[in-house]
Amino acid sequence: MQRVIVLTLLIIWLVISGILSLCYTLHADSFWLFLMWPFIFSLPFSLRLAAGIERQFRPALTLISHRRHRAWVHLAPWQPTVGLTPAQVNLFWESVTDSTCRALENNRIVIVSSHLLTPFRARRLIALIEERAFPIRYRAFNADFTPMAKAVMQCEMLCKQWRWRRLTRTDWPVLVIRHQSLSSNK
């Protein structure tokens, strides 16, 4: 199903890029059309280069976003998730722990969700947070990983990392952490 969605998205983008190329080269030779069309079609694939440049200026491994008195901890979208050494994986999870603790200092509820979050990693994250003397309550559950969400993630991996990966997971792990001392006040 997700292959069909990705293929459909690529065909739609091929048509849109063709229309844009036609609009740009309406009064020019057909040579320019056949030059512009592949150029416009390949623009999303330059996201890998853009992510590499962004990594130089924003080296953070995680992001904290705030909405409606909640904080979400995310993997920074410009960071690669494949081909990492064990030391780099360790740095990533330290960053997730640090970001979660920073978010818990100011927010009542923190949500960590990632396709990379496993039950073992969730337990480890909770243990590290509790070691830092945060009184917390938490709940881990799995949200549905719909075919459309998988297709979007595949397109993102294709454009940003130039690789095709078949996503077989059917669920998306979510960890909701509540700061107990703040929850009694609010």
Image (cartoon, grey):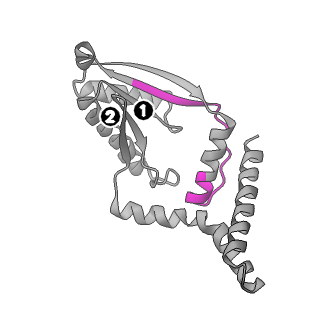
Instruction: State how far apart marks 1 and 2 are (Cα).
Output: 8 Å
* Percent position of residue 11, x then y: 76, 57
Tell me, yes or no, whether the highlighted magenta stretch contains residue 173.
yes
Residue 94 location (% of width, % of height): 33, 41
Q: Give the residue number, with chain letter if any, for mark 1.
A: 112
Q: Along the horizontal axis of the image, is 130 left or right of 15?
A: left
**Which residue was labeled with disc 2?**
100
Instruction: Please tell me which residue is depicted at 73% across the width and 56% down the height of the picture.
Output: 12
Q: Is 173 or 185 nearer to us in this picture?
A: 185
Q: Can you give x and y, in whole percent of width and height, for residue 24 in the image?
A: 66, 76
Element type at marker 2? helix
Q: Nearer the viewer, residue 133 or 18?
A: 18
Whether label 1 touches label 2, CB < 8 Å? yes
Task: Classify residue 139 as left or right of residue 145.
Answer: left
Task: Identify the mark nearer the N-term, 1 or 2.
Answer: 2
Q: Residue at x 39, y 60 (%)?
A: 55
Q: Is residue 165 above or below residue 112?
A: below
Q: Left of 13 or right of it: where is 56?
A: left
Task: Name the residue type under label 1.
Answer: Val
Over which residues does the magenta segment extend?
A: 156-176
Q: Specify the amino acid type for callout 2.
A: Thr
